[in-house]
Amino acid sequence: MADSHQMLLISFTGPAAGRAAFQEALGLPGLRQAAVLERSPDGLLHVPESHVHGSGIATAGGGLAGGLVGLLGGPVGVFLGTAAGAALGSAAENQQLREDGAGLIMLSSRVDDGASLLVLDVHESSPQPADDLARRHGGILERVPAKDFAAQVRAAERAAEQAAEKAPEKPQFS
């Protein structure tokens, strides 16, 4: 099988299995991101575990590149270049986090009361490791091509924006 970028959604009937599978999933080859969504028996949703491979690299890299460019301006240039580069890198990471959060919000409707969902963003060269992971923890695995998942998230965002535009304006209090 050729390397494929997939979103893996593994459903569990309880939170313990989802958390245990999350810990094991951190060792999956090609893992980019992982998160556990849990819904309490009374319906409250939370994300107790999450992981982003390479988190902070854009911020650190931007700061380093900015500092190197800032060398041309002397000590103050290094300081300003590092700060500007780190700010740009951080902005890029924040944008990615917002997009990822939208995907988790969209998936929240799949989590029943008292259940959990393990969400994995992975480049798979073989389906076997994830299949084995789901089987060992008693989960039900669904694969969604990452580009299809991204299109679903964008469609849900557009629908939410359109609904917000059509909603009657609420009075503002001062």
Image: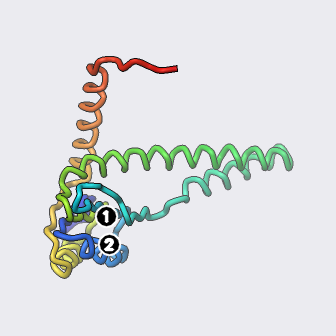
Q: Position of residue 111 (x, y in %)?
A: 20, 57
Position of residue 98 relative to residue 8, above or below, is above
Q: Sort mark 1 into few (<14), some (14-19) or many (20+) by Cα contacts within 10 Å.
A: many
Colour style of the rendered protein structure: rainbow
> What's under tag 2, amino acid-wise?
Phe
Point 21% across, 47% down: residue: 148
User: Badge 2 is on which residue?
Assistant: 22
Q: Which mark is residue 36?
A: 1
Position of residue 132 relative to residue 76, above or below, is below
Cα gap from disc 2 to disc 1, whole angstroms: 7 Å
CB under 8 Å between discs 2 and 1 = yes
> What's under tag 1, amino acid-wise?
Val
Q: Which mark is residue 67?
A: none
The image quadrant that residue 162 belongs to is top left
The image quadrant that residue 11 belongs to is bottom left
Please, which residue is most extreme toward the bottom here? Answer: 136
Point 24% across, 75% down: residue: 17
Mark 1 lies on a secondary structure that is strand
Q: Position of residue 118 (x, y in %)?
A: 26, 65
Position of residue 126 relative to residue 38, above or below, is below
Position of residue 45 relative to residue 152, above or below, is below
- Residue 30 appears left or right of 81: left
- Residue 139 appears left or right of 24: left
Q: Sort mark 2 into few (<14), some (14-19) or many (20+) by Cα contacts within 10 Å.
A: many
The image quadrant that residue 40 belongs to is bottom left
- Residue 97 appears left or right of 64: left
Q: Position of residue 110 (x, y in %)?
A: 18, 54
- Looking at the image, is mark 2 or mark 1 earlier in the sequence? 2
Q: Identify the image quadrant of the N terminus.
A: bottom left
